[in-house]
Amino acid sequence: MRTRFALAGVCLLTLLCAPAVFAQKDAALEAGVDRQMPELTATYRQLHQNPELSHHEEKTSAFLAEQLRRAGYTVTERVGRYPDGSQAFGVVAVMKNGSGPTVLVRTDMDGLPVTELTGLDYASKVRAVNADGQDVGVMHACGHDMHMTVLLGVARELAASRERWHGTVVLVGQPSEETIDGAKAMMADHFYERFPRPDYILDQHDTNMAEAGHIAISSGPMLAGANSLRVTFHGIGAHGSSPALGKDPVVMASEFVVLAQSIVSRQISAQTPAVLTVGTFHAGTKNNIIPDDAVLGISMRFYADDVRKKLLEGITRTANGVAVAYGVASDRMPEVSLLESTVPTVNDAVLSERMRKVAVQALGAERVDKATPVMGSEDVGYFALDGKIPFVFFWLGAADPQKFAAAKSGGPALPSNHSPLFAPVYEPTIRTGVTAMSAMVFDLLHN
Ligand SMILES: [Zn+2]
Ligand SMILES: [Zn+2]
């Protein structure tokens, strides 16, 4: 017992002493961020009130480009080309400051077709016409306005402290993250032939999964890869009173929806994360008509390519198997079409541990949380060229600390990203984002 008491005493002392011994926060950086806060909060509110949908970030990108140019960066606008040939609104800002490594920091820029319900005095009232011709409310419901604000803060900190670093900084304003085709559009526009190829890539995303003032970082998988699929069952239409005269695609598709649930639960290892969700089911025009076709919209999530392949094979095999069981002719087998896709977001083990230590130094250990992987998706991974360039993504806490604590102890859940109620506590979130990200870039470009 004595030994245990003695050990406890040592541990307690170590814990109490540790902050005093190790925490040497960056006073110059903190003062710089302090000076920037009035302008950054005004920028955040302005961006929040003026969201633009994916593929339409024209004014947002022009604003970002102008601010980066004023901060001393060499800026290229309208970087990116979509597969249909249309122009993307990517922004690339470069600052060279002697010889040294190259660091790329990325923000996304697009808002969502969500009508804001926060009731904030700076709430968005913007409406726009979406790709389907519908009039929709537009909101920065995923917090990309926060990401742009933080990027501008980091840009100005770096520009104002050029004596502290050597190398090249590449700041990227990426369009169309929500439609996961913005990063691909920028890469398709000869990105790494036109701009310096980085040695390191950094990115962050605001979230209510962590409280404002904190960040959360881990090594390994952070966000899943995603594929969207369309599965079309071809039947034979008939009168609803005579099903035996047709082949009912509604029944086939229904059977498929149930069977497909066993692909994840029975064909993928229990140790391996995977999700398969049938999100849409469209068929028919009238109660008493058996339609010709039924069309399903599927989303699948994964961290590893072999899991992606297993999911895809499982979906195809199950759809074909159902069609065979219902006696569909071989030339009318189901069609499986791959729609949007994106790669997993995976943190480099060495770089993420280095950046975690930098964040602990800059913010204090009590404000650096361990991140847990989620099955949401991002497209920032395309800049890392399939893991060839070391990459780190971290969560930027945005939740009101009191509401966060209440939610943790069984109180009302906080709104997630994409909710019409998503409202980061912006002052501490901006301050923490700029401090953490600037400290990381300083560390990577320290001579
Ligand atoms: Zn989003
Ligand atoms: Zn987002």
Image: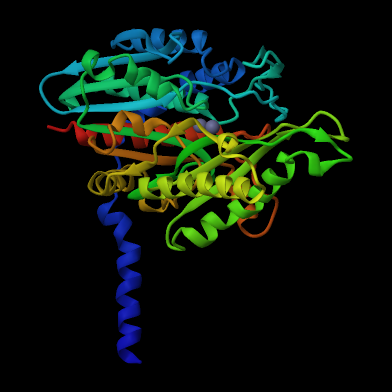
Is 89 above or below relative to 101?
Answer: above
Picture coordinates of residue 150, whole percent (x, y):
42, 27
Picture coordinates of residue 102, whole percent (x, y):
19, 26
Decide if residue 345 is on the left or right side of residue 401: left
Decide if residue 166 is on the left or right side of residue 429: left
Residue at (67%, 12%) from the top-left corner? 129
Number of numbered tags placed on the structure image? 0
Is 405 above or below relative to 241?
Answer: below
Picture coordinates of residue 356, whole percent (x, y):
31, 47
Q: How is the image coloured?
A: rainbow
Is 447 above or below relative to 190?
Answer: below
Decide if residue 172 is on the left or right side of residue 420: left
Quadrant containing the C terminus in the rendered view: top left
Q: Work out whether residue 351 can be spotted.
A: yes
Picture coordinates of residue 288, whole percent (x, y):
88, 35
Which sits in the foreground, 65 or 379? 379
Quadrant containing the N terminus in the rendered view: bottom left
Is 178 above or below relative to 265?
Answer: above
Which sits in the foreground, 226 or 322? 322
The quarter holding residue 329 reads top right
Q: Work out whether residue 156 can be spotted.
A: no
